[in-house]
Image (cartoon, rainbow, N blue to C red):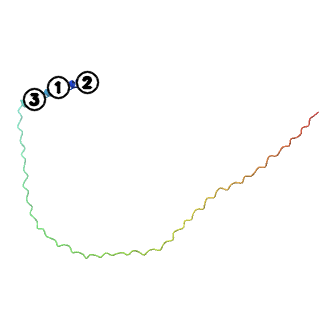
Amino acid sequence: MSETNNDSFKAEMIAEIKKIQSELNELKIIKKNIVKKSSKRKTAVKKKVVKRKPARKTAVKKKVVKRKPARKTAVKKKVVKRKPARKTAVKKKVVKRKPARKTAVKKKVVKRKPARKTVKRKTTRRK
C-alpha cells in the first residue's frame, strides 16, 4: 500500500516539475521578444582601431671577440699531514668515595630504680 502511495506521489511531483519548467520556458521566450523590440535607436558605437606594434628593429650584431683561455696554474701537491704521536696514557684520577654513613649511636637506656616499697604501718587500736 505504501508503494502505491509513494509511486503516485512521485508521479504527481514529476508532473508538477514539468509544468513549472514549461511556464519558465514561456517566460524566457517573452523576455527575448521584449528585448529584441526596443523602440529606441542606439547610436553607432565607434569601433576601436587597434594599432599595430611597429616591426622590431633588428639589432646590429656586435662582433664577439673570443678571449684566450686563462692560464692554468700549476696544480699544488696535497700535503699529507702525519698523525701526531700517541700520547702516553694519562693516569685516571681516583675518585675518593664518601665514607659510609655512620648509623646513629644508640642511646643507653638508663634503668630506673624500682620504686621504694612502702611499709605498712601497723595501726594501733585505741581503747
Residue in front for this viewpoint, 19 or 12: 12
Mark with earlier residue (3, 1): 1
Q: How many marks?
A: 3
The picture quadrant where one finds residue 11 is top left
- Mark 3, Cα crowd under 10 Å, few <14 / some 14-19 / many 20+, is few
User: Of discs 2 and 3, which sits in the foreground?
Assistant: 2
Q: Of the residues shown, which amino acid type is indicated by label 3?
A: Ile
Residue 5 appears at what percent x and percent y?
A: 23, 23
- The answer for how far apart the CA atoms under marks 3 and 1 are is 22 Å
The picture quadrant where one finds residue 43 is top left
What is the number of the mark on residue 15? 1
Mark with earlier residue (2, 1): 2
- The answer for how far apart the CA atoms under marks 2 and 3 are is 41 Å
Q: Of the residues shown, which amino acid type is indicated by label 1?
A: Ala
- The answer for how far apart the CA atoms under marks 2 and 1 are is 20 Å
Residue 23 appears at what percent x and percent y?
A: 14, 26
Residue 21 appears at what percent x and percent y?
A: 15, 28
Residue at left offset 10%, top offset 28%? 30
Mark with earlier residue (2, 3): 2
Quadrant including the N terminus: top left
The residue under label 3 is: 29
The image shows residue 100, relative to residue 40, as above or below, that is: below
What is the number of the mark on residue 2? 2
Q: Of the residues shown, which amino acid type is indicated by label 2?
A: Ser
